Amino acid sequence: MIVNGLSFTCIEAINLKLNRMQWFALLAAIIVDVLVGALVALSLVPIWARPDSDLLAPYIGLYLAPLAALPLLLLPAIFFLRFGWKEKFGVRAFLLPIRLALGFEFLSGGIEKLIDTTYLASPGAIAGAIANPATSDWARGVLNMMLPNYGAFLLLIATGELLVGLSIYFGGFTRLGAIGGLLLMWTFMFLLGSLSPSTFGINFIGGVAFLALGMLQAGRYIGVDQFLGPKLDKSGNRVLHMLGSLT
C-alpha cells in the first residue's frame, strides 16, 4: 500500500536506516516535488484564483486546487521512491495518480457545469456543434434530435461527469464509474470527434484510460473499494456479491 509505504519510508528516514539508493530516492522525490509545487503555484494558481462571474461559486477553481495538485505531486514522488522501495511501490502504485487526475477532470467539469448560470440556459454547446461545418452528417442528425430537449441532455452530461468524477477520484464503485466515463468519452468522440483531431484524440485516450482503470480495479488501491470491495465479494447475498464486481 502506498500509504503504508510512505509512512514506513518516513519512519526509516527519521531513524536514519536508509541505504544510499534510498537516500537518493527520498531526496530526489522531495526536490522534484518542491519544483513541481513551485510551478503549480506560479502557473496554475493565478488561473484557479481568477473568479468566474458565470459561476455561482466564482472561486471554485481555487477550492478544487488541492484535488488537482495531489496527482501532480504524487506521480514524481512514486516514481523516485520506487527506486528505494520497490517492494512497497509496485507498478500498480502508478494507477493512483492516473485515477486521481482523470477523476479530478470529470469531478471539476461536472461541478462547474452544474453551478454555471449559463450552461443550462441555452443550447449553445449543441447548437454550436450542429452549425460547425466539420460535424459529420450522422452526428448532426443526432444532435438535431437532442436540440428540442437540450436542457435535459446538458443536465444529464453534467450529472454524469460529477458522478463519474466522484467514483473515480475516491475509488468507490470504480468499475461502474469507469463504465460511465467510457460511455461519456466515446459518445463525445463519435459525435464531436470530427470537429478536430485533438477532440477525437482526447476522448479516445480518456476512454482507454477509463477502460484500464476499470479492468484493473484501480479503486481497490487507496480508495473506497479497498475496504468495500472485499466485503461485498464475501457477502452471501447475491445482489451484494454482484455489486462487488462493480468495485
Image (cartoon, helix red, strand yellow):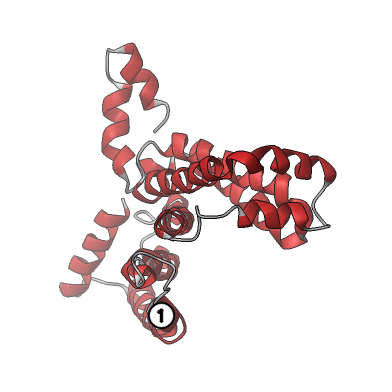
Secondary structure type for disc 1: loop
Q: Position of residue 93 (x, y in %)?
A: 41, 54
Q: Residues within 10 Å of mark 1 (few under 14, many from 20)?
A: few
- Which residue is painted at 34% across and 48% down in the image? 170
Q: Answer above or below: position of 24 versus 216.
A: below
The front one of 39 and 74 is: 39
Q: Position of residue 130 (x, y in %)?
A: 74, 51
Query: For this view, does 146 lie left or right of residue 167?
Result: right
The front one of 138 and 16 is: 138
- Which residue is painted at 62% across and 56% down in the image? 125
Name the image quarter holding the C terminus. Answer: top left
| Quadrant in the rendering for residue 51 | bottom left
Q: Position of residue 4 (x, y in %)?
A: 25, 54
Total numbered circles: 1
- Which residue is painted at 57% across and 49% down in the image? 209
Furthest-left residue in view? 15
| Quadrant in the rendering for residue 153 | top right
Query: For this view, does 125 lie left or right of residue 94?
Result: right
Q: Which residue is mark 1?
A: 50
- Which residue is painted at 82% across and 48% down in the image? 136
Query: For this view, does 185 lie left or right of residue 36?
Result: right
The front one of 153 and 245 is: 153
Q: Position of residue 58 (x, y in %)?
A: 36, 71
The front one of 46 and 87 is: 46
For the residue marked with disc 1, what is the amino acid?
A: Arg
